Amino acid sequence: MQFVKLGSTGLDVSRICVGCMSFGLPDRGPHEWTLDEEASRPLIRQALEAGINFFDTANVYSDGTSEEIVGRALADFARREEIVLATKVNGSMHEGPNGHGLSRKAIMTEIDNSLRRLGTDYVDLYQIHRWDPTTPVEETMEALHDVVKAGKARYVGASSMYAWQFSKAQYTARLNGWTRFVSMQNHYNLLYREEEREMLPLCEDQGVGVLPWSPLARGRLTRDRDVTTARSRTDEFGKTLYRQGDDEIVDAVARIAADRGVPRARVALAWLLHQRAVTAPIVGATKPAHLDDAVAALDLELSEKEIEQLEQPYVPRAISGH
Ligand SMILES: NC(=O)c1ccc[n+]([C@@H]2O[C@H](COP(=O)([O-])OP(=O)(O)OC[C@H]3O[C@@H](n4cnc5c(N)ncnc54)[C@H](OP(=O)(O)O)[C@@H]3O)[C@@H](O)[C@H]2O)c1
């Protein structure tokens, strides 16, 4: 396994992060396609055996059951001090007032709930899952700083938002001597490259680690449009992300994969791993071969010509996934 530092921190993370949105009880929350505990545990174990130490979940994934499953598996199969465990806050955890968002109250409640479900005293990376336009950024950044100072999180990170929002959060923290974000978890793959305009240059300039989510466009980059799976049929959020104009890019991935005799996923992930700003893609695996391909992508060197063929059909598109 290859390890890199997360942004400008001293933290060692594997170049592949395991996306734990795949793990959770299918009848809890909106993701019908997730794997239950019995089916999830072998994949978590396989990832650890491959040397992966980086796991990303969220309080909202399958209504908290992703955190429970991941926490138990890591306690059984791993040494906590080697693992980089990331979770997130912002999504709705209950109806009524204060059930979501980034108020001080929500953050303080949710970090404790996440730690309880994960069965650990601290998370390594506590990420805000989105921007909260209804809470002053000073309130959010101070609360996150206090979470760190209380020893409940080692680092803080952010996820999909506009670059101006991310900058505002960072300078607010800097002005007040609070903990700054060390990572940006954003929507970035061959079918969605809007992040190349502002967010990726900002992260590179500021030494912020980049952790792309849905690096395979939720499976879209790995197969022809007419091939469906349990997930593709029921992934309602995914259906809103990729629509027209993608086929040429998917075809380019397929052609290069066929020429090299490797699965398409390896080519699509290798392209991301060639992007200078990218620290570690967060891969979603529902089968053992998905993890094998992710690890094998680390050794796939693409030529400049192949990279050009993969990038050339892209046309700018509307912002999605914020
Ligand atoms: N911050 C955010 O807002 C946000 C949003 C989304 C995701 N995330 C994070 O990112 C992680 C990954 O997201 P994602 O699951 O959408 O990522 P993804 O890697 O783009 O998609 C995963 C899906 O692609 C297919 N796949 C993966 N490897 C494959 C292979 N080698 N061959 C063929 N098909 C393959 C599988 O589809 P099938 O199951 O259909 O076979 C799998 O479920 C999540 O678990 C979560 O941690 C964060």
Image (cartoon, rainbow, N blue to C red):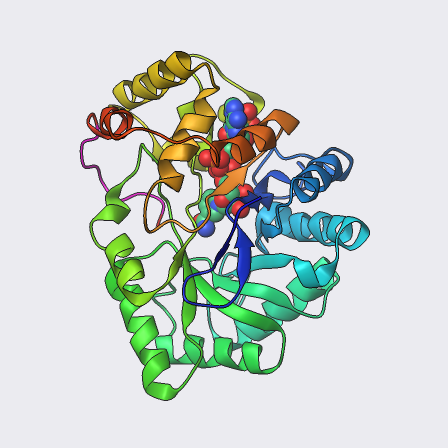
Q: Nearer the viewer, residue 128 or 304?
A: 304
Q: Quadrant of residue 252?
A: top left
Residue 217 visible at all = no
Describe residue 22's horizontal placement relative to residue 236 as left or right. Answer: right
The residue at 27%/48% (across/down) is 195
The residue at 24%/47% (across/down) is 196
Q: Nearer the viewer, residue 259 or 235?
A: 259
Q: Position of residue 209 (x, y in %)?
A: 40, 58
The residue at 49%/79% (across/down) is 145
* Residue 250 among those drawn in magenta: no
Describe residue 73's horizontal placement relative to residue 253 as left or right. Answer: right
Describe residue 52's horizontal placement relative to residue 146 as left or right. Answer: right
Q: Position of residue 76 (x, y in %)?
A: 81, 51
Q: Nearer the viewer, residue 227 or 124?
A: 124
Please identify the quadrant where the N terminus is shown: top right
The residue at 57%/58% (across/down) is 87
By secondary structure, the bulk of the magenta-drawn segment is best described as: loop
Q: Magenta segment range? A: 314-321
Q: Position of residue 168 (x, y in %)?
A: 28, 72
Q: Quadrant of residue 31?
A: top right
Residue 110 visible at all = yes
Residue that extends furthest to the bottom in the rendered view of this protein:
176
